[in-house]
Structure formats: C-alpha cells, structure tokens
Image (cartoon, grey):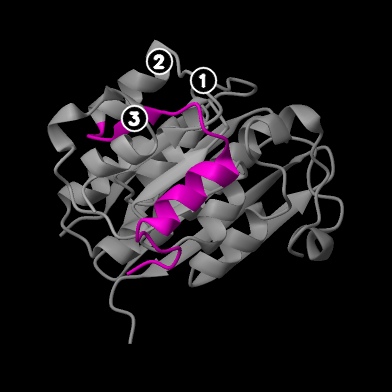
Amino acid sequence: MKLREVSQILNAQVLCGEEYLDTEVLSACGSDMMSDVLAYVKDQAILLTGLVNPQAVRTVIMMDMKCICFVRGKMPDDKILEIARDNSIVVMCTKEGLFAACGKLYQNGLVGEGT
Amino acid sequence: MADIVWTFEVLANNFDLAGSASQVAKSRLKQLSLPTELIRRIVISMYEGEINMVIHADGGIATLTVTPTEIIVVLKDTGKGIENVELALKEGYTTADSQIRELGFGAGMGLPNMKKYSDNLVIDTEINVGTTITMTFKLNKK
C-alpha cells in the first residue's frame, strides 16, 4: 500500500512529506509508549500514535520508519514538523482514534509484523 | 584509521531537545556506511540512555567512539545514581513519574532495551554521585 492510500483510508491530512506519498509500506504499529516501540517494533513503516511531542518523531527516525500518523485529531507543532521534514518523514493527522485507525489499515491489508 | 570520537552534551529537563543527540549520532553513523541494523541498535540504545539522562539525572555527556572493531557509547551523568541496578534492568520496573510518562517513556524499558540491543552493557553507579553507562557494539559480529 502506498502512503497516499493510507492517508485516504484514514481521511488524514498530510502535514509534511507530500513528496514521499508514493512510498510503498507493508506494516504499521500503534502505540503511545515510545519505549515499547523501541523494544518490540521491527521494520514497521508507520507509527500511529496519540503522543504528540518531538520524542515520537525521533522514535520514528531511530526505527527507520517512513511515516507518523497522529490520531484523535491531535496536531503537531512546527517544531515537530521541522524535525520530520529534516529527516524525510511523512506526517499525517487523522480524526480517527488509535484503535479505529489501526483497524482500518489492517482491514485494508497492512500487517503488524515487520517485513 | 584513527578512532572517531563524538561528544554530545545532554541537557537536563529539556524535553524539546531530549533525543536530539541520538538523532545527530544517527545521521553521522549513516555517513560511515555502517550496516543499517547495527546503526539502529546503537541509536535505540543511545536514545533510551539519553532520555534517562534528561529525566532521571541532571543531564550529562554522551560520547560515541568508533574504532575499527567496535562502537562504544558512554553516557556519563552526575545525577542521583541507580539505587538497585538489578531491579532497574528488569522489564517493567520504573521509578518514573507521570511527567515522564507523558513523554512516552517511563515504562521500565530503558535499561532493558539498552541491554537487549548492545553487545555489552556496563553500569557504574553511585548514589548521589552519578552513573556511567558503557555500551559496546561489535562491528563484525559473527
């Protein structure tokens, strides 16, 4: 699935990284706990989270993920977007909750396991 | 080739910058064309350590040394020290408060993650004096 389709499925607003929307992704994870992402995630491409702070984006960078999607309509500030832009990370924002957002992507073919 | 040494100052209680040293270290390590998986293990461990220094200690100094055979990450602080190292290494054990949890950390996974991802972890700590954590990553594992 392309990141563009992810944004469409989640009816998400793309806040930065539009130029990378043709990137193919196979898996995603959802968590508000960054230590868990650092501990258990392997090669997932998207992080869905309700945690809006620089550490969430930095976690995505550390894990070589491509995209962060903030759920529950939470909007990142410019500082967060700047870090994302500097590191070629796509940032999206959806009004969906974490459970529903993950469910919709799973239903459309994304998996939880890294590939 | 001479060893490469990078030093980063980690500021206490600066949550905007928490993790930025690891972020810079990652981009520099990438320029050295090291294996992606190795870089990831190094920066995850350094990131966890850096967050620990910001929230538990009064900041400190992170040093990353690249030698022809290994990469060594040393995190040195002058904070309150770790009371019970054995407990701190246990997954899920935490002394973090709600402010730390709001950052997405404080799940008791910091030191366990550092142990999991490094090839060797040494914790040298003294109450009210500080903690020095040394993590080694072999360049040519197996």
Position of the N terminus of chain A, as image quadrant, is bottom left
Residue type beneath disc 1: Asp
Would you place residue B23 above or below residue B88 in this image?
Answer: above
Disc 2 target residue: A79
Q: In whole angstroms, how far apart are the C-alphas of marks 3 and 2?
A: 13 Å
Query: In terms of image quadrants, where is residue A10?
Result: top left
Which of discs 2 and 1 lies nearer the camera? The answer is 2
Tag 2 subunit: A
Whether residues under marks 3 and 1 lie with C-beta atoms below 8 angstroms apart, the answer is no
Mark 1 falls on what kind of element?
Answer: loop
Disc 3 target residue: A91
Residue type beneath disc 2: Lys
Disc 1 target residue: B16
Image point 21% across, 61% down: which residue?
Answer: B34
What is the count of numbered marks?
A: 3
Between B54 and A72, the one lying in front of the other is: A72
Would you place residue B14 above or below residue B116 in this image?
Answer: above
